[in-house]
Amino acid sequence: MPQIANFKLFFSANRSAPYLSPFVSFKPYFSPLLFKHRTPQKLAFPFTVLSSSAGRQRKPHPPPPPKSRSNSTLREAKTGEQSMEEAKPIGFNKRRAEGRDKSDRPKDLQLKVRKLNPVNTVSYVQILGTGMDTQDTSSSVLLFFDKQRFIFNAGEGLQRFCTEHKIKLSKIDHIFLSRVCSETAGGLPGLLLTLAGMGEEGMSVNVWGPSDLKYLVDAMRSFIPTAAMVHTHSFRAAPGADGVALADLAKFVEPIILLNNEVVKISAILLQPGCSEVRQQMKEDSSMLNVEEKKDQILKFPVLNSQDPNGKASPVLKPGDISVVYVCELPEIKGKFDPAKAVALGLKAGPKYRELQLGHSVMSDRQNIMVHPSDVLGPSVPGPIVLLVDCPTLSHLQELLSTQSLDTYYVDSVDQNLNTVKSVNCIIHLSPSLVTMTPEYQNWMKRFVGAQHIMAGHEIKNLEIPVLKSSARITARLNYLCPQFFPAPGFWSLQHLKNSMPEYITSCEFHLRPYAQLGLDKSGIPSLLTATEVVNELLSEIPEIEIAAEQVRKFWVEYQKHENVIISIPYDKTMVEEPWMQGDASAPDKNSGKQDASEAEEIQRICKASTDEINHESYLPGCLENIGREDMEFVLLGTGSSQPSKYRNVSSIYINLFSKGSLLFDCGEGTLGQLKRRFGVKGADDAVRRLRCIWISHIHADHHTGLARILALRWELLREVPHEPLLVIGPKQLKRFLDAYQKLEELDMQFLDCRHTIESSWDAFKDKVGSNKNDLPPRSPISIDDKGEERGVMNIETTLFARGSRMQSYWNKPDSPGDTGMGFQNLMKLKKVLDEAGLEALISVPVVHCPQAFGIVLKAAERMNSVGKRIPGWKLVYSGDTRPCPELIDASHGATVLIHEATFEDGMVEEAIAKNHSTTKEAIEVGASAGAYRIILTHFSQRYPKIPVFDETHMHKTCIAFDMMSINIADLPLLPEVLPYLKLLFKNEMMLDESDEAVCQAA
């Protein structure tokens, strides 16, 4: 039997940290290189650095003073009503920002030792239907025992599913992966984080997989905190640089026994893509490929090893190409002990009875004979056997059909001698329907006579049943209230397929112990949830919501009936009046003909005469003049923090530029599933194909662990057509993760450090492009001079990134020669992408959260209206995770929309400082100070499962974000008007839902 490689990896860090003074003040600063057209304005608040040193108590920090509705930063800058010295200070946790927070110190996590009872136990396998309704990830399977839990596959959304269905993860000791790739392991980082944070001691876990898990652990090492520990067990050798030849896997013929204890024996049978004649024919016959287009999407071809020593090209594999059939065998149940037979054989009642029940032979007390267990025990009951089959492609299917490792489990007829085979009770199929629906697979299933088949893979029928019902119910309610901002989910309509598809079981439990309950339990199968049912339930619960929905429809119709009138206001800004907000006073009806010229002049005169009293929220920025609905739309795919919950997924924003492509800002776990819930399975595939760039704000797991799945899917979708690798922009640590992960599966991406996209780096890049000749080698926009000073970088002396601080070391660290050249080339590529997408700028902005944390500014290029007038481009700013900081305020000046994190409510300023997050009021004041037209609050702590706590008096140009909220830039004027109705929708749910068991500690 092949040896199993064992690895024990512990993420450690330097425990030492210098003591910091609890209060260090510095002056607010605005970069002169950001948005040079503007003179820096005064801030409404200065900043204070707060240390989080252990043992020092920090007094609650008072929040900033409230502002009146009519107050604006522009007006403050002009009148000087409030000086910085008079304002309340804003603090932040410097240790956390520099990556030295005490919570990052490692724990001494140990594997739990559990006492197992093989007889008196309850056991079952449960399908955890992650990905069933979205086909974005592999389903997980829970093997349950009283004292122990086993998880098979940990795809994205596993924690969210467990929270939804109240499945506790505290007793998980082992995680088995059927493949080592993003589809089966995308949820593993988040799960490890959760287990490590349980209780005071945390928990460790064993992870098993068919590939060298060192690659997976190395990838996670760049962002998993030092508190996490994982024991990895790989049951095949690691491939070389070019992969592993198929011939090297020939020795894995017999099942590999991985675990064998008192309650279960778990074995593995390896499957690797083969080179069958059918597969070769499909590859060569283009006409067949056209007919079988869907099958081709899941057919993977191994890379050819051109350096074969025999001169022949042999297929080689990446670690993620190998899949596993897991065999779970419970021990047999001994027959009932018969005391009468024991007495007849000369035994006295006593310890020998126990020995016989344990399977040991004993000497008779009265006769000179040996008494064997079979002499006094009734017939034994064979232990249940469960197979978990992951056959991801047609190429793997050929190996599944030909493997000899399963021969002992085949029962081809009911008359077969059961003494020569092991009868399988249940087979869980993790394979996609495009494999399971083939005649070959169907015939293979028939070889297991009497087995219960559970189809847990990507079955088309499963799309009708939402797995996350709580989230689906919230989405349906929001859609009823305001379908413009909350479109209906984009699932396929599959009514026409019902009669043509077999009746598959999608989610259930199969009982293994006690023996009397052996069999399928269908009570857990989810029912179809329709929007009509949800709306009827809503109307019964909140009758007045029907009137509210009608009001929303009316003011939307009213808004669409009016045209916008251009007027001028102070501060050299062009605004557009929003007449629908002023009732019927001024705007003409589109259907009533042209307005009289004298009437238009009178409107202009009245508006100009009352400029000082204009409510700025009643006017559109000039960039929205005659804006089209095909210009830009952004979809808030995830609006929660820390980890996914029942109602909110973690951070991700989809920027839809329609015919010009799309972008992603952050990509937390489950982002692909959210795309599929919003656009449908096919629509999400199109959205992924059209991605031009992905931007990641920082290295925390809730902002990027969905990235590998998106990249892997894009490569699958585009691998047969010419295309460019996708550009990924992020902090430098992210590159380590992606480079390590690419050894598992193809990601097809190019990386660009966020530092290369700050404003001053763009300036240096433009200068270099203008002066660089062919005979000069390209250099990084960030460079170090002879004195070790960084050139081409924003002045950072008076900010968190002051010279000599730990943060500054990240900025002054020289890039390797390869990085500098590649950074220049990728900036060239990014510039091309921006030009083709109609964008003027994509600028990363350093913010205060953790080392190398950034916000982003996305600005559209100017456009021409129908009469040749130049219209300025819109400007979207996303804060990432941050405390209020001057760099972001400066960069957000005049933003059309600011999407700002608001993790905590106003009364939790101290918690916000400790975690370097913002409160709702602080986020709104950042937008007010920057003069942003609209503010959207997001990244809410999971202590607010449905709607956060907020002060309505500060929300006049602000809205609360929800998952799947889709905002077209043409609809921005209406955004604040929806908030009161949203509050009505959640009037009974403004407090924490204790049943959610949400994790309230923000990342």
Image (tube, grey):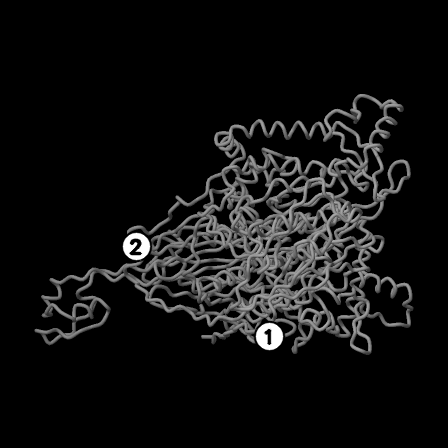
Q: How many marks?
A: 2
Q: Is residue 240 left or right of residue 79?
A: left
Q: Is residue 282 visible?
A: no
**Which residue is painted at 81% across and 59% down in the image?**
32
Secondary element type, mark 2: loop
Give coordinates of residue 505: x percent, y percent: 45, 46
Count residues near mark 2 (Cα–Cα under 10 Å), then give few for <14, some for 14-19, many for 20+: few
Q: Is residue 692 left or right of residue 50?
A: right
**Which residue is painted at 89% across and 23% down in the image?**
598
Q: Quadrant of residue 781?
A: bottom right
The residue that label 1 is drawn on is 18
Q: Is residue 315 above or below residue 523?
A: below
Q: Which mark is residue 534?
A: none
The one of 265 and 896 positioned closer to us in this rendering:
896
Type of the residue with mark 1 = Pro
The one of 248 and 138 positioned closer to us in this rendering:
138
Q: Which mark is residue 514?
A: 2
Q: Is residue 943 left or right of residue 554?
A: left
- Whether residues under marks 1 and 2 lie with C-beta atoms below 8 angstroms apart, the answer is no
Q: Quadrant of residue 22?
A: bottom right
The one of 671 and 950 positioned closer to us in this rendering:
950
Q: Is residue 7 above or below residue 460?
A: below
Q: Is residue 3 visible?
A: yes
Viewer-nearest of labels 1 and 2? 1
